Image (spheres, rainbow, N blue to C red):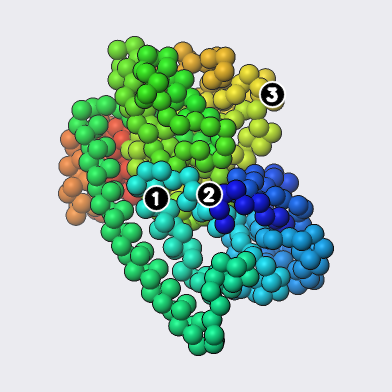
């Protein structure tokens, strides 16, 4: 499908006792994602189940109802709110006889269109191929139904084409992994240069459309950096799919400010894994600025999503500031995040801007993480890092290794994280 083609879509979701997301919020977000690709959402269908049906995601009776709605409403595409297994996608497609896609594929399509940098294009292509590989048969059938695929004369010919496609995708996956690994090394070399020059890294993270890029541009403008250095910012989902680095000097302090991609609930696993390189700056950051949309009634859900992604990237112990953006339009004047340093902020009125910059300077001046670790005697490289770079409070030679109580620069914490006793116990 190309942007500009208007197709009628029906959205389908389920609620279970294990859900962490409000179904109304989740389906409204799915609608916004669909609208981004110019789908016209006609209606929603929901069902309460103990767990998704292994064969058809929803119950077979509900699927039959959807088939009637598809015909009555002249629906072009049915979009499911969760990632469908290959079997579910195949069974649903066979029943409905029209294009069927899931939330993961929808997000991958958006990323594919929005990618601009070479690294982002490589990473998205890899995530898309990893998603498609086990679903080739279903997508062949989907494309045939919407006129996008060539018909096959015999079943055997079709199977041959699918096998050729499978081999092509597998070869492409291997090539993409090689290219991404090269780009990853270049990125790590760039980060090493920052660290060698002792330039702290401050990363802006947050839910998609929370205002990260606009915040970066506000800071650039405030410190006198010209418009030619500003980053793309627009009121739309996933406006930024690349990281942007800008050196900032404020109050005689230099730091590298990094704008990153936005997150959304139920991000495809392959997408997060593939974007490892793009998110390297976050992993190596001295400080994370978690930008949140304080005007959203679902701010709690959005904060949780970003926190979960940061945990999956092993960035959860990096010092963080929570920036309650869009404060001029906030839903509550008493909003706060217990146990976290928060700043009430507005790009529109510039409220909180000086506090943000002063807090950044303060935090990167003390950007260390306290940890208690046990390093095996065989890990001499880790011992060298600790002895050379960390402030050692306690050192004990024990039976299984060297026990350290240390304060280590946050940018180096990921190197010793596997030996953190708190994490090993949990």
Q: Is residue 197 left or right of residue 304?
A: left
At horizontal 42% and vertical 17% (from top left) the residue drawn is 221
Dot 2 or dot 3: first in sequence order is 2
Q: Quadrant of the N terminus?
A: bottom right
At horizontal 49% and vertical 30% (from top left) the residue drawn is 233
The 10 Å Cα crowd at callout 3, few under 14, some 14 to 19, many 20 or more, is few
Q: Quadrant of residue 57?
A: bottom right
Residue 159 location in percent, x, y?
Answer: 49, 83
Judging depth in this view, the residue of 325 and 316 nearest the camera is: 325
Residue 23 location in percent, x, y?
Answer: 71, 49
Whether residue 331 is visible, yes or no, is: yes
In the picture shown, does residue 271 fall above or below 284? below
Q: Which mark is residue 110?
A: 2
Residue ID for mark 1: 121
Dot 3 or dot 1: first in sequence order is 1
Residue ID for mark 3: 332
């Amino acid at each position: 499908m190309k942007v500009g083609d208007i197709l009628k879509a029906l959205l389908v979701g389920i609620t279970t006792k294990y859900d962490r997301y409000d179904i109304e919020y989740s389906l409204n977000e799915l609608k916004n994602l669909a609208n981004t690709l110019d789908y016209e959402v006609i209606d929603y269908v929901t069902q309460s189940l103990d767990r998704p049906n292994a064969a058809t995601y929803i119950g077979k009776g509900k699927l039959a109802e959807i088939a009637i709605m598809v015909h009555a409403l002249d629906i072009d595409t049915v979009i499911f709110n969760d990632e469908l297994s290959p079997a579910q996608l195949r069974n649903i497609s066979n029943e409905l006889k029209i294009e069927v896609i899931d939330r993961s594929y929808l997000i991958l399509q958006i990323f594919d269109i929005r990618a601009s940098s070479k690294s982002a294009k490589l990473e998205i292509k890899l995530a898309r191929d990893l998603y498609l590989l086990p679903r080739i048969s279903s997508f062949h059938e989907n494309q045939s139904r919407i006129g996008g695929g060539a018909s096959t004369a015999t079943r055997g010919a079709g199977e041959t084409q699918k096998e050729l496609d499978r081999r092509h995708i597998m070869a492409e996956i291997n090539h993409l992994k090689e290219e991404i690994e090269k780009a990853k090394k270049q990125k790590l070399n760039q980060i090493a240069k920052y660290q060698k020059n002792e330039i702290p890294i401050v990363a802006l993270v947050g839910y998609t459309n929370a205002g990260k890029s606009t915040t970066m541009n506000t800071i650039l403008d405030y410190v006198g950096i010209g418009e030619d250095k500003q980053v793309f910012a627009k009121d739309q989902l996933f406006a930024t799919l690349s990281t942007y680095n800008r050196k900032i000097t404020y109050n005689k302090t230099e730091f590298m400010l990094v704008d990153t991609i936005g997150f959304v609930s139920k991000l495809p696993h392959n997408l997060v894994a593939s974007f490892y390189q793009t998110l390297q700056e976050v992993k190596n950051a001295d400080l994370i600025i978690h930008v949140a949309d304080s005007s959203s009634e679902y701010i709690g859900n959005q904060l949780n999503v970003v926190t979960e992604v940061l945990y999956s990237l092993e960035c959860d112990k990096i010092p963080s500031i929570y920036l309650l953006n869009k404060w001029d339009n906030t839903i509550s004047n008493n909003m706060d995040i217990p146990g976290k340093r928060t700043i009430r902020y507005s790009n529109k009125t510039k409220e909180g801007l000086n506090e943000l910059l002063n807090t950044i300077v303060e935090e990167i001046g003390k950007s260390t993480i306290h940890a208690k670790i046990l390093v095996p005697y065989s890990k001499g490289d880790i011992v060298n890092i600790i002895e050379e770079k960390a402030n050692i409070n306690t050192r004990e030679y024990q039976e299984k290794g060297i026990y350290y109580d240390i304060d280590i620069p946050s940018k180096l914490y990921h190197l010793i994280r596997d030996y953190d006793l708190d994490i090993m116990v949990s």
